[in-house]
Amino acid sequence: MANLTFFDLEEQLASIGATPDEILNHQGLMRDEIEEAALEAGRLREQWRSLPLWDDADVPRIRRDILAERHELNETTTTPTDELRVEQLAEAEIGDELRLTFDRLEVVSPAGDERHSEYLVAFGKPAGAIDSPELRPEKIPALIDELTVIYRQWLDLVAVEGDL
């Protein structure tokens, strides 16, 4: 069920610095489709940003697509046939105010050889949260605990895969 507006997408993707253009390019609908939805809802064509056209499941996909595109644009050692794989290694919500994810981005050749990996920790708003991501001081220990778990997971990966 669609429950998120474009403004909600912007808030939930703020942790990765997603621009409106990046969100538009990866949100899954054509511009004329979303403008038509605004007209069908009895609004002006330009008011599509305030319509709930997306749901919570769209946010991780849009986030992965934006990160993947950025990685492809910044990566100079990839070839057109390389594949970018995004794997979410961990996800945690600190109360109902803050969400964080630990992701691995891999560039893999057509032969299956890993060219290189990159790890990211992203902070955002949990699904269904009304306000922007925030954390009350009493939740700081829970955040530290979750970050410690992710850090240990990263250290384990370094031990297995070498310097990352």
Image (tube, rainbow, N blue to C red):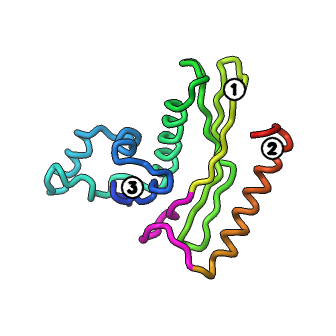
Label 2 crowd (10 A; few <14 / some 14-19 / many >=20) = few
Mark sitting on residue 115: 1
The correct choice, above or below, for 73 with respect to 3 in the image is above
Locate residue 93: give its quadrant.
bottom right
Label 3 crowd (10 A; few <14 / some 14-19 / many >=20) = some
Amino acid type indicated by mark 2: Val
Q: Is residue 7 a member of the stretch shown in magenta?
A: no
97 or 163: which is nearer to us? 163
The correct choice, above or below, for 78 with respect to 155 in the image is above
Q: Is residue 125 a member of the stretch shown in magenta?
A: yes
Amino acid type indicated by mark 1: Arg
Mark sitting on residue 10: 3
Q: CA distance from mark 2 to mark 3?
A: 33 Å
Mark sitting on residue 158: 2
**First along the sequence among labels 2 and 1:** 1
Number of the front mark, 3 or 1: 1
Q: Position of residue 155 (x, y in %)?
A: 80, 50
**Residue 144 horizontal side relative to residue 65, left or right:** right
Q: Secondary structure at mark 1?
A: strand
Q: CA distance from mark 3 to mark 1?
A: 32 Å
Mark sitting on residue 102: none
Residue drawn 21% across and 46% down? Answer: 35
**First along the sequence among labels 2 and 3:** 3
Q: Residue furthest right?
A: 159
The reply to whether the C-beta atoms of the residues labelled 2 and 1 are less than 8 Å apart is no
Residue drawn 50% across and 56% down? Answer: 15
Q: Secondary structure at mark 2?
A: helix
Q: State which region is magenta.
A: 123-136
**First along the sequence among labels 3 and 1:** 3
Q: Residue furthest bottom?
A: 138
